[in-house]
Amino acid sequence: MSARSLLFVPGDSDRKLEKCAASGADLVIMDLEDAVAPEHKAAARARVGAWLGARPQRAAPQCWVRINPLDTPEAALDLAAVVAARPDGIVQPKTRSADDVIRLGRRLDELEAQHGIAPGSTRILPIATETPASIFTLGGYGSCGPRLYGLTWGAEDLGTAIGAAGNRDAHGAWSAPFQLARSLCLFGAHAAGVAAIDTLHADFRDQPGLRASCAEARRDGFTGKLAIHPEQVAVINECFLPSAAEVAQARRIVALFAAHPGVAALALDGRMLDLPHLRQAENTLARAQRLPPGPAP
Ligand code: COA
Ligand code: MG
């Protein structure tokens, strides 16, 4: 099951690294890129490597590292400092296409072999919309192979790259260029058969806005969302689980099809249901398995 909440933590902050394990996030991303000033990158690399090495292996949350863009000298230093300590995955910023992911995968092949790590076990999550050219390659990530964990998108670097004065319309919704990036990321992820992770809600004190953006993301087919503050985690985790009403409805749909073997189109409450509805109901029940044990809804 893919992660619902993916919490960024600046790699140069001991205090925040301490807090992230107890945040409840499904996945923590220790950042070595934009949240760390150039003069602190070396210390952050060492800290993140040590921090990863000290954690109980494969314990929750998953621990990932965002490295610097692959073609910078920092990226090689980042990988050298952290891969030996077995992160669950690497978040790759500013990817331009699947080729960048494939190239990172080759570097990981070498490092995994060098450190006796199971081949392919370090996954990759590209932030796939941060450069203007990347928007035109979002349909190609299916060629990345099994290291690819998901696709996510970012609005801030893209806006800077195109000189956008803002990224929201008068009502607070994403403006058209950013909606396009978001939608293409969503379709690109599903076309590649991997998790679709929505970008972060930057206003981290705005809980109603976060909740609305999670609801829209789930409605549209995203499976999780980036976070930047521990207080965003609980809302994201809750919003990316099916509600009790959705689970109850999914159970009804599965039961209806089970009661009519060999029939592909049925009616329920005056609405037509066919096989995509059955698949969707089964997906809902699978996602609901993550619910804490409790009375059946
Ligand atoms: N992970 C873990 N702990 C965090 C955290 C995070 N991302 N963000 C805040 N905290 C901790 C703080 O250390 C603080 O704990 P303390 O009082 O014990 O020190 C507590 O949560 C409350 O923090 P708060 O005062 O509300 O926020 P802040 O002003 O300290 O930090 C940010 C605000 C935005 C700088 C911070 O949330 C942050 O660094 N986020 C991640 C940024 C990042 O990684 N960006 C890269 C991806 S875009
Ligand atoms: Mg950035």
Image: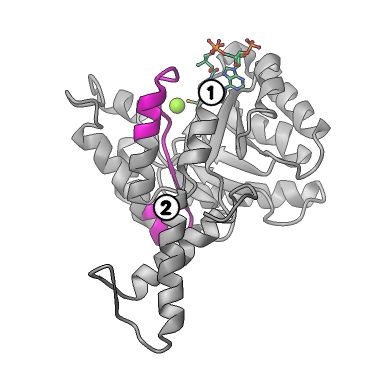
Rendered location of residue 228, percent (x, y): 51, 25
In this rendering, the answer to whether 111 lies above or below 30 is below
Which circle, 2 or 1, is nearer the viewer? 2
Give the alpha-carbon distance from disc 2 to disc 1, as whole Å. 26 Å
Task: Determine which residue is flagged by label 2.
Answer: 245
Residues packed near mark 1 inside 10 Å, few (<14), some (14 to 19) or many (20 plus)? some
Rendered location of residue 183, percent (x, y): 30, 47
The image quadrant where one finds the N terminus is bottom right
Q: Which of these two is toward me, 252 or 81?
A: 252
Q: Which residue is drawn at 68% across and 38% down?
A: 61
Q: What element carries label 2?
A: helix
Residues packed near mark 2 inside 10 Å, few (<14), some (14 to 19) or many (20 plus)? few
Rendered location of residue 265, percent (x, y): 30, 80
- Residue type at mark 2 is Ala
Q: Is mark 1 within 8 Å of ligand 1?
A: yes
- Residue type at mark 1 is Glu
Task: Determine which residue is flagged by label 1.
Answer: 231
Q: Which of marks 2 and 1 is nearer the N terminus?
A: 1
In this rendering, the answer to whether 215 lies above or below 262 is above
Q: Quadrant of ligand 1?
A: top right
Q: Which of these two is toward me, 40 or 229?
A: 229
Picture mark count? 2
Quadrant of res 266? bottom left
Residue at the far bottom: name it.
Answer: 262
Quadrant of res 36? top right
